Amino acid sequence: MFAPLTPLDWKRRAIKYYPDKTAVIDEEKSFTYREFGKRTDQLSLALHNAGIQKGDHVAVMLPNTHYMLESFYGICQLGAVMVPLNYRLTAKDLEYIIRHSDARMLIVDAEFGKIIETIQKELPIEKYIVVEVDGHGSSIEGETYESFIASAGSEGQLPEVEIDENQMMTLNYTSGTTSNPKGVMLTHRSNYLNAANFLHHLNVTHDDVYLHTLPMFHANGWGGIWALTAAGGTHVCLRKVDPPLILELFEKHRISLLCGAPTVVNMLVNEPKAKQVKITTNPRMATAGAPPAAALIAKAQQILGLNMMHVYGLTETSPFILYCEWKKEFDSKTPEEQAEIKARQGIELAFNGETKVVNQEDGREVAWNGKELGEIITRGNVVMSGYYKDPEKTAEAIKDGWFYTGDLAVTYPDGYIEIQDRIKDMIISGGENISSTEIEGVLYQHADVMEVAAIAVPDEKWGEVPKAIIVLQPGATVTEQEIIDYTRSKMAHFKAPKSIEFVEALPKTATGKLQKFRLREMYWNSSKKVN
């Protein structure tokens, strides 16, 4: 009486019980669960007819559209492996990933056709499927998506495929910084249990309307692509992050749930229309990807009425391993105190396994005192099966059955974990550890600061000292010294930044993470300044 754990079963359930419920809204198009199921089955049949079998790899380079959602189900229910591509990577990285992933086919949005054209001769792709987009032509030799799935007909039978819950379901690549991107092997089981965490801890219900602000390629949309289908909720697609449009969609589609990095939260609260619109749905918003400042959470709740939920994880863990559980006793605290609690990464989720913070020198769990610093490690149901074709990197990351995250944190007396910094981002000045996220948290409280990144820069006396690189609010005229004085009034003087640089934008990944390594390179590798 054993049934493998796979999120694909939730599509079957949704079609069975909610056939006429709106499953997907994509701009002017919408599909019921019956229609969505038919399209995904047609994609599976077309792929099968084209020679894709269990274990084959299919790469997909699409924005948050219904085609991307269909691909997750249509590819994976064949027992094939989906390789979601970050469409904001360089041609060099894309070429490496596509070749390294052993993908046989590529489904690509016409908007991204030009970058693929530059590397097409170097790719081992056997067949290209192009999603047509108004205003974006493509000279890639391939079949259009609609004609491809239409060729399968509507009455064909899907091949019977036996799914092993421990077989690879998706191959998700991390962003390469100092080395090539790594392929994270996630199984049907790990995707299922992560999505179960998403369902349970983000309180997903049948009536939820979920806005896909988070790139679906990023850790499979954190599991949202599966979880909303499990509940029979409605997926609302969003081709790109557009704050005015997002604010409009909140009311137009009665959005009740969304996810995004703190950068997206910051974009929303600083959108000029944010103070003009009245959002009546009080959407829940999960944030992760970088430690969010308490001040940013407070703004999101006060300005937009968002109910912020903080989760934490990595691509290697499917991704959720911690969430900031909200207790009734917190309701009596001030808004500022509540925001400080919500800035913590929190405690283990119900289905992921064990997570703790350990001393880097002796491996023992740190004291639950909110002070002793250690590295977050985890083991259990959602940890990757390894890096694809890279046993050495796998052995570096997984030791004695534990995955080492590279994040430094403390544990409070109630068990809540709070990240202090990435190991590589910690500032060590004169032998003292200074958290870059602590500096950023203070600066986000300043009314003139829109975005900030704190990094270490060389110093003859102390080895390195903190520097803050800031994007100011429109029209702000605050000076460097005023910012330095402000931080010194809020934190220990040795922790305060010694210099400030004002810039127009900060470098980020496609998922909104600050690329601090690019900022550090400006000061450690050359005399070149940020511009």
Image (cartoon, rainbow, N blue to C red):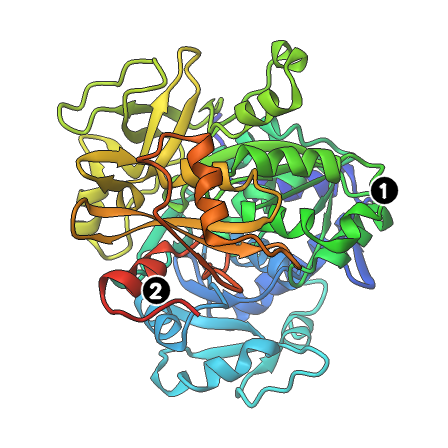
Mark 1 vs 2: CB contact within 8 A: no
Q: Position of residue 466 (x, y in %)?
A: 32, 46
Give residue 377's quadrant in the image: top left
Residue on which the image places disc 1? 278
The type of residue carrying mark 2 is Ser
Task: Assign the C terminus to one quadrant of the image.
Answer: bottom left
Residue on which the image places disc 2? 101
Tell me if mark 2 has few (under 14), some (14-19) or many (20+) residues whose alpha carbon lies within 10 angstroms of its own.
many
Q: Position of residue 292 (x, y in %)?
A: 51, 38
The answer to whether one can see residue 227 in this image is yes
Identify the secondary structure beneath mark 2.
loop
The answer to whether one can see residue 130 in this image is no
Q: Which one is in front, 339 or 77?
A: 339
Q: How many discs mark residues in the rendered view? A: 2
At a point 49% along the width and 68% down the height, the residue shown is: 88
Alpha-carbon span between mark 1 and mark 2: 46 Å
Identify the secondary structure beneath mark 1.
loop
At a point 18% along the width and 29% down the height, the residue shown is: 360
